[in-house]
Image (cartoon, grey):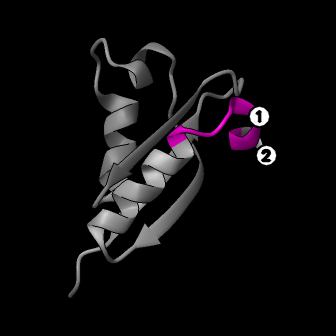
């Protein structure tokens, strides 16, 4: 089976923070965002509600897309 890569955006329940990330296991990564207790951004702002994701077969394409989304304005990300 070929490996898949996910570019995803999460937010908190009040939708005041947006986090964009990349992973090869979306379910595991979302679990980590919800359960890991440390000083990372996702824990500090309780950013654990999945609002968007894309699937890629090529990691370079996924990284490129993640960087593109991270460069967007907050308004564009919310839309």
Classify 17 as above or below 68.
above
The picture quadrant where one finds residue 33 is: top left
Residue 7 sits in quarter: bottom left
Report the span colored magenta: 70-77
Numbered disc 1: secondary structure: helix
Left or right relative to 56: residue 11:
right
Q: Are marks 1 and 2 in contact (CB under 8 Å)?
A: yes
The disc label shown at residue 75, or none: 1
Residue in the image at 41% along x and 44% along y: 21
Q: Nearer the viewer, residue 56 or 31?
A: 56
Q: Is residue 12 magenta?
A: no
Q: Is residue 53 left or right of residue 66?
A: right
How packed is label 1: few (under 14 Cα within 10 Å), some, or many (20 or more)?
few
Circle 2 residue: 79
Label 2: which secondary element: loop
* Position in image of residue 9 (x %, y %): 54, 45
């Amino acid at each position: 089976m070929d490996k898949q890569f996910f570019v995803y955006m999460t937010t908190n329940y009040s939708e005041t923070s947006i986090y964009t990330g990349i992973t090869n296991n979306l379910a595991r990564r979302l679990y980590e965002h919800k359960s890991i207790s440390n000083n990372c951004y996702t824990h500090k702002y309780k950013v654990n509600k999945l609002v968007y994701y894309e699937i890629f077969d090529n990691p370079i394409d996924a990284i490129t897309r993640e960087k593109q989304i991270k460069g967007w304005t907050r308004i564009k990300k919310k839309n």
